[in-house]
Structures are given as structure tokens and as C-alpha cells.
Image: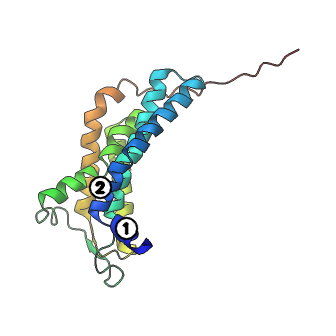
Amino acid sequence: MLGKWQDWIGTFTGVVASTVVMLPVALLAVWALARHRWLIGYPRAQAWRWSVSEVGLVYGTVPFVWMTLMPGSRAGLVPGRVSLVPLQDLLVMGAAQIIGNLLVFAALGFFAPLRFAALASLPRVLALAAGCSVLIEAGQYVLRLDRVSSVDDVLLNAAGAVLAALASRRWWRAKAGPSPERPRLTLVRGR
């Protein structure tokens, strides 16, 4: 039974189905985080904004990273392959692969500047997404997952994050100032 379960979640269909099944959990996590924050003194708008951003960042990124780290049919049997010539692989990628690569860090690009004021700039989002993408490509190579570690994947992943950041820019540009400090709770002692 366990082997069949592992085989199922190690497929594209399994990742998509797991993501859909986890949607109610993600929504519950947003509500619980926001409620906790406003109960301890954060303004409701900030509590909701941070909670949606944090859960959205994780919920929107983890499935794509999961898919990129799924092993191919000859994982462990073939050496890692690297493609360092920019735009070479892009010419042979299908539309689905291009769109998939653009979506890998789209949630990160959309939500990170909303949650973290230090990331509220396009160059910082680009650097973060490119760095994360390089780590994934290096992992694919080192783990010998029967995948090609390509510079074009890094370019597409980073471009997707920047495009998503542009989509959310109207909300994070207004909030790019320093994050307010956490409210301090004071204990009142009885006499």
C-alpha cells in the first residue's frame, strides 16, 4: 500500500490532486493566522495581509518545487546533465513547459513583497527567485534526478517571479515602508 501511495504522489497528477485537496487546509491556515494576529493586537488589515501572503507564498510555490524535484524514469542511473547556453533549451521547450517554468516562483514574486518590505523591489525579487532557481537546478544535478539542469529554467523561473511581482506591485509599493513592530502585550499585576 505504501509503495502505491508514494508512486501516486510522485506523479504530476498526484501533485495537482494533492494541491487541490490541501486548498481547504490553506484557507483554514490563513484564517487561523489572521485571527491569532489580530487577537494579539495587530490591526486586522495587516493580520489578513500577512497571513494571506505567507500561506499564499507557501501554497503557491511548494507544488511547483515538488514537481521540479520529481525524479525521471532513469534517476540515479544516468549522470546529471547541464545546459549553460542561454536560450538554447527555450527553443525546444513546449508551451506547457514554458508556462510551468514561469509559474514555479510566481507565488513567491507575487506575495513576498506584500509580506516582507525588504523584498519590495523588482531587482530583489529577481535576485531571490534566480537564487532559489539555481538551488533547484543544482539539486536536480547533484541528486541525479534524470533531469537537465538548464540556465533557461533559471531565466524563466526568475522572469515568472518578476512578472507576478509586477502584477502585485500596486499593493506592495504603497506598503514598502518598514514593517510595524509586533504589538507588545503588557501584563497588569494585581495589588
Q: What kind of element bears circle 1?
A: helix
Screen quadrant of the N terminus: bottom left
- N-terminal label among 2 and 1: 2
Residue at the image point whose x is 32% and y is 82% from the top:
79
Relative to residue 175, is residue 92 drawn left or right? left
Q: Residues within 10 Å of mark 2 (few under 14, many from 20)?
A: some
Find disc 2 in the rendering and name its residue: 16
Dots 2, 1 in contact, CB < 8 A: no
Relative to residue 29, is residue 123 drawn left or right? left
Residue flagged by tag 2: what amino acid is it? Answer: Val
Residue at the image point whose x is 16% and y is 66% from the top:
89
- Which mark is on residue 67? none
Q: Taking the image as drawn, is residue 119 in sight?
A: no
Horizontal and vertical percent position of residue 56: 38, 41
Disc 2 vs disc 1: which is toward the camera?
A: 2
Residue placed most toward the observer, 187 or 29: 29
Q: Is residue 28 above or below residue 73?
A: above
Q: Residues within 10 Å of mark 1 (few under 14, many from 20)?
A: some
Residue at the image point whose x is 85% and y is 16% from the top:
190
Q: Taking the image as drawn, is residue 135 in sight?
A: yes
Find disc 1 in the rendering and name its residue: 138
Horizontal and vertical percent position of residue 126: 32, 46
> Hey, which quadrant is residue 17 in on the image?
bottom left
> Hey, which quadrant is residue 12 in on the image?
bottom left
Q: Can you name the residue that lies furthest to the bottom here? A: 77
Residue flagged by tag 1: what amino acid is it? Answer: Ala
